[in-house]
Image (spheres, grey):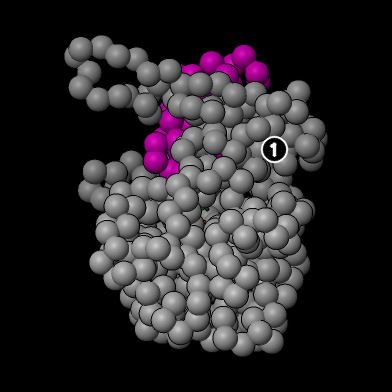
Amino acid sequence: MNNANIAILCHATAGGSGVVATELGVELAQRDHEVHFVSTAQPFRLSALDCCTNVFFHQVGRYEYPLFEQALTTINTANTLSEVIQEHDIQITHAHYAIPYATSALMAQDITQRTRVVTTLHGTDVTLIGLDPAFRHSTRHAIVRSDRVTAVSQYLANHTKDIFNVDVPIDVIYNFVDVHRFQRNTDAKYRARFAHPDEKIILHLSNFRGIKRTLDVIELFARVQTEVPSRLLMVGDGPDRSRAFELAQKLGVIGRVHFLGSYPSVETIMGIADVFLLPSSQESFGLVALEAMSCGVPVVSSNIGGIPEVNIQGETGFLCDVGDIDGMADATLNLLQDEQLHAAFSARARARAVEHFQPHHIVPQYLRVYEGLLNE
Ligand code: GMT
């Protein structure tokens, strides 16, 4: 594809959709496209501004006026994006997460009469918030009117068509991972910081929202640690953090659970773990599971949404029903108590990430979507 000028809209806060959007933008810039991020704040993983001359960030301002009781982010984004489209001759606008960015992108397209809009659906923009009566019609409109729609798993593509009763084509383009960055961390000082040599390390990383079921993580760890000396690292922050902390206290395991907050270089922590836990009640893909697998960490997860397209039952990890704490505890113990089994799962997890989910497998799929639009 010839070099293009591409605008990327994404949520700046820590979250998988922002990570995917940011890393896609950097990959595009490395392939000589000009990339303009438009968001309310600089996306949290965007360090490329320091190293690439063809990555730009345009902040969406917040306009305060006594008459407005709430921020009008959708309109402000459309306005900023319209300027960016005109000033930088943006040919492709790629909205990550339908709400509000696909709507803002379509508005800017209408204002400028330029640019093609690609919307990538990430998960709760369809399965949770997008379905709420507060957003249902505008989300459906964004899906139907975007020039192309992609989803991060087959599950999400199918589910979107069902629940919104739409028959637009939805391309499935999986998330990707930098396998050089996310790999085993053999530097002993990291393990020594959290665990004694005879202890195993179990990891959970999320934004601690209800759908992540962080309390299940604590409960199942409480069972695991009675049989295998181990530590639990809880990385991230969010609404359920205090409840998880209180449950760990109540179950008498608080001394073995480390709440690390939003740890900046997650790969160093992921790379020392023995098992990664993802018991979510909804997950359209599970980028964190893929990152863990890339580090050679077997994943014990729920069997929900798009997770089975990433974590393969009995090969890279184990999948249990949502809320099956006993099943997940047994699966974790299986892995921790059998070194040979663990080594085999670890190797297969890493191999799956390396063989199927690297940027060079995935980014060309986005480029084909862009190219198709530019050639129309
Ligand atoms: O939908 C969300 O919960 C937010 C979103 C995010 O920004 O973290 O996560 C979704 O997008 C990720 C990247 O594509 C996926 O890996 C996550 O599975 C997905 N989350 C859910 O579906 C709950």
Residue count near mark 1 (Cα–Cα under 10 Å), binned few <14, some 14–19, many ≥20: many
- In the drawing, does residue 99 fall left or right of residue 32? left
Of residues 118 and 328, the one drawn nearer to the viewer in this rendering:
328
> Any magenta on residue 102?
yes
Image point (66%, 37%), residue name = 25
How many numbered dots are placed on residues in this image?
1
Of residues 66 and 148, the one drawn nearer to the viewer in this rendering:
66
Q: Is residue 83 above or below residue 260?
A: above
Image point (66%, 84%), residue name = 339
Of residues 106 and 125, the one drawn nearer to the viewer in this rendering:
125
Q: Is residue 170 visible?
A: no
Furthest residue in direction top, as rendered: 65
> Any magenta on residue 210?
no
Q: Is residue 232 above or below residue 70?
A: below
Give the quarter of the figure containing the C terminus: top right
- In the drawing, does residue 359 fall left or right of residue 43? right
Q: Position of residue 319 (x, y in %)?
A: 48, 79
Q: Which image quadrant for residue 23?
A: top right
Image point (37%, 18%), residue name = 62
Main secondary structure of the magenta stretch:
helix
Q: Position of residue 203 (x, y in %)?
A: 51, 64
Q: Is residue 279 visible?
A: yes
Q: Which residues are magenta?
A: 79-107
Give the quarter of the figure containing the N terminus: top right
Residue located beneath label 1 in the image: 26
- In the drawing, does residue 159 fall left or right of residue 315? left
Q: Position of residue 259 (x, y in %)?
A: 43, 54
Q: Amino acid at mark 1?
A: Val
